[in-house]
Structure formats: C-alpha cells, structure tokens
Image (cartoon, rainbow, N blue to C red):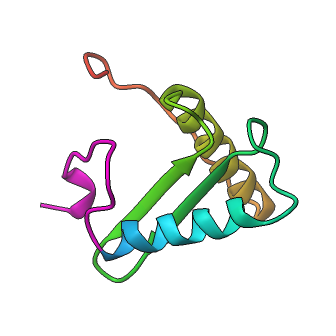
Amino acid sequence: MSPLDVHRTNGEPHDRQTRLAEVAAAAVQADPEWIEGRDRVIVLISDDGAGGATWQGYEGDDVQALVDTIEHLQALARSTGRDVQVHPLPGRG
C-alpha cells in the first residue's frame, strides 16, 4: 500500500514529515508580516517513501484548503509548460 493510500485525519502530526510540515508552517506564521485571519499556508514535505502536509489558517475549511492546494499545483505545472487536471470520481466524497 502506498503511503498516500493511508487515510489521515486532523490532529497532531503523526510522523516525521507531518512534524516538519508543522514546523515550517509555524515559522511562516511567526513572521511579522503574517496577517492572522487573512493569510493561509500550505506545506508539502516529501522524501523517498512518504510525504506530509499541513494546511494552516483555514479554520476547518478543508474544501477551500483543497481548492487552494489544487490551484497552486496547477500554477506550478503551468510554469513548466504542463497542466494538472482534477476529475472527481463518482461515489467518492
């Protein structure tokens, strides 16, 4: 099973990658330019076998966090001449 197949929920970081993602997000939030209630941060961490992520500043709005993540991935792909498409799967969600 791929690490991406494992369902994770909200809560405390559960492995090295999610702990690193939390540290990175906390560093951004500690910056004097961070505007509480307006700014949001998405952190993705990967190594050879697993990955971790955190969304901060979304206050339980997982849908908006997911939309923002997809939009950022699309922008990154387009900057390299590629594209990312998202297609919902029937019966999921």
Camera-side residue of 78 and 53: 53
Whole-percent x, y for residue 51 in the image: 37, 68
Residue that protrudes farthest toward the left in the picture: 1
In this rendering, the answer to whether 62 lies above or below 23 is above
Q: Give the vertical position of 32 relative to 20 (above or below).
A: above
Residue 81 is inside the magenta segment: no
Q: Position of residue 93 (x, y in %)?
A: 31, 21
Instruction: State the residue at coordinates (69%, 59%).
Output: 29
Q: Residue furthest bottom?
A: 48
* In front of the other: 53 or 83: 53
Residue 44: percent from the left, percent from the top?
A: 52, 63
Chief SS of the magenta region:
loop
- Give above or below for 66 relative to 84: above
Residue at figure coordinates x 25%, y 16% from the top left? 91
Please provide percent x and percent y for residue 50: 30, 72
Q: Residue at x 47, y 30 (%)?
A: 87
The mark tally for this picture is 0
Find out whether residue 12 is within the magenta segment. Answer: yes
- Image quarter of the N terminus: bottom left
Determine the residue located farthest toward the top in the rendered image. 91
Question: Residue at position x 63%, y 42% from top?
Answer: 57
Q: Is residue 66 left or right of residue 46?
A: right
Q: Which residues are magenta?
A: 1-15
